[in-house]
Amino acid sequence: MKTIEIAPSILSADFRVLEREVKAAQDAGADRIHCDVMDGHFVPNLTFGPLVVEAVKKCVSIPLDVHLMISDPVKYAPDFCSAGADILTFHAEALSDTKAVKALLDTIRSKGVRPGVAVNPDKPAELFIDELAAADQVVIMSVYAGFGGQKFMPQTMDKVRVVRSVAISSGLDIDIEVDGGVNGETAADCAKAGANVLVAGSFVFGSGDYAGRIRAVREAASKAYTENRL
């Protein structure tokens, strides 16, 4: 059975004191730090590049879970690998076909980084499911990529179930991460569907109690995950 992991997203952190924020999240029990990279083209928002990832890497000892929401992940993935990503995820819909998805997963792994693939709520698992064995992680977006604080879309859990089912039947030990609208209530839905990594941005960084919020997500998810014997 996989372990539940919580990955606060710095998209909702106070960038004026980013070092303090990520250290506080780590001290509060976060398992990873989630870094949302947006290019203003693939998604209608612009965040940061490799330099910020490199800076965050120097501040914490837990893994950096870097999520590329960009139009040309093939071009820029090596830069984020070099910057310190421990896990690097790109969107399958940004590439031409499943062969291109497989090639980029292999490239990321060759850099010593764990590769992951993501899809938006309106994109099917078929964009990557045939290449699942090449990935260490699948990210199912439960909101549309681009902005924090959006409302959780429960229908996206169908894709989590599909991916977890294929992973189990194929004997694959992969992480399934849900990103978007995760809180103390929706965490249980994610875990019931088969997710074991939960990205919580505004729910954690928008509160005055990082440890309490991380604990709430973990406890809700862990209970549901155990009950479903996943």
Image (tube, rainbow, N blue to C red):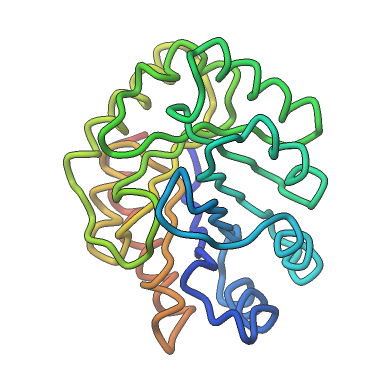
In the picture, residue 93 is in which quadrant? top left
Which residue sits at x=24%, y=39%?
Answer: 156
Relative to 97, residue 135 above or below: below
Relative to 229, residue 212 above or below: below
Measured from the top left, where is residue 163 in percent x and y? 36, 25
In this view, the residue in front, 165 or 54, is 54
Measured from the top left, where is residue 191 in percent x and y? 32, 45
Q: Residue furthest bottom?
A: 208
Q: Quadrant of the C terminus?
A: top left
Q: Residue furthest left?
A: 155
Measured from the top left, where is residue 63 in percent x and y? 68, 54
Asked whether, in this view, residue 193 is left or right of residue 4, the answer is left
Which residue sits at x=53%, y=37%?
Answer: 71
In the picture, residue 199 is in which quadrant? bottom left
In this view, the residue in front, 145 or 89, is 145
Q: Residue furthest front?
A: 41
Measured from the top left, where is residue 92 in percent x and y? 47, 27
Relative to 8, residue 3 above or below: above
Which residue sits at x=34%, y=36%?
Answer: 194
In this view, the residue in front, 8 or 228, is 8
In this view, the residue in front, 118 or 184, is 118
Asked whether, in this view, residue 158 is left or right of residue 204, the answer is left
Asked whether, in this view, residue 116 is left or right of residue 185, the answer is right
